[in-house]
Amino acid sequence: MPDEIEFRTKPQIAVEMIDRALTNGVHVAAWTFDELYGRDGKFLDAFPTRRHCLIVARNVLTGEVKYFFANRVPGERNPITGEYITLRSLLRVAFGRWSIESCFRQAKEELGMDHYEVRGWKCIHRHFYVTQLSHLFCARIRQQYDNPSEDQPDRLSVEQVRSAMNTWLDTIDLPPAARRQRFENELRNQRYHQRRNRQARQSHTKTTLERLATLGINPAKIKSCVYDATKSKPMAFQ
């Protein structure tokens, strides 16, 4: 580890990353923070100089309660878009963390981000860079072929892209007939998992909608409330 590297907490690292993003012209509609960052006063004072709000969200199906801090307040205008900030928009930002956690899981389980056996400072960074480039490649392939049809019953997963690439690399030196056979086997395997993924997703969606219906909740008709920040009462529904 280089001598100039000093220990920093996660909030300290986050402040530096946020400063770099803002300096490079990145526009952010809203920030939300979980308990690690939301309870750090120095972190909160470092860049959201405006008012904050506390979001308490309860899952009606499990009863789980989550708390978030946000640097925007429902009812105020967003300085980036000029639109009124709604509670729904802040919740979308807060729970967007799931997609980030999913990226970490994919990188670790499918691309070996945590499977390094090195001791050098540069070596471990090179490993992370290669993993991230591999993940970017898989994401672009998924986006390129994200067109479910009869021939492709469901969207590709990172696991399926990785499996297809492994098959292609493993068969480079095989005779054409052997390569074709491996490709056909891989394609059958891909189609099987795509059908199962679609069935599982449809079943999960159906079950969730039925459970919400028993509570009298129709997700298609959920309204988002805009609050008057000065009067602490609803202004309108969107």
Image (spheres, rainbow, N blue to C red):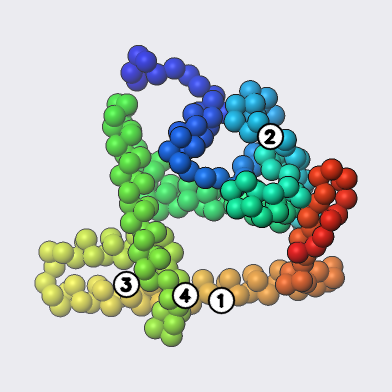
| Distance of label 3 from label 2 (alpha carbons) | 54 Å
The numbered mark, 3 or 1, whose residue comes first in the sequence reads 3
Residue 105 seen by the camera:
no
Q: Quadrant of residue 67?
A: top right
Q: Amino acid at mark 4?
A: Asp
Q: Which residue is mark 1?
A: 199
Mark 3 surroundings: few (<14), some (14-19) or many (≥20) residues within 10 A:
some
Kindly indicate whether the residue at mark 2 contacts the one at mark 4 (C-beta within 8 angstroms).
no
Mark 4 surroundings: few (<14), some (14-19) or many (≥20) residues within 10 A:
many
The numbered mark, 3 or 2, whose residue comes first in the sequence reads 2
Which residue is outermost to the top? 3
Q: Which residue is mark 2?
A: 50
Helix, strand or loop at mark 1? helix
Q: Amino acid at mark 1?
A: Gln
Q: Which residue is mark 4?
A: 154
Which x, y percent locates residue 152? Answer: 41, 79
Image height of 183 relative to 69, above or below: below
| Distance of label 3 from label 4 (alpha carbons) | 16 Å
Q: Is residue 198 left or right of residue 79?
A: left
Which x, y percent locates residue 24? Answer: 43, 38
The numbered mark, 3 or 4, whose residue comes first in the sequence reads 4
Q: Which residue is mark 3?
A: 186
| Distance of label 3 from label 1 (alpha carbons) | 20 Å
| Distance of label 4 from label 2 (alpha carbons) | 44 Å
Q: Amino acid at mark 3?
A: Glu
At horizontal 54% and vertical 29% (from top left) the residue drawn is 15
User: Which residue is at the front of the view, 213 or 16?
Assistant: 16
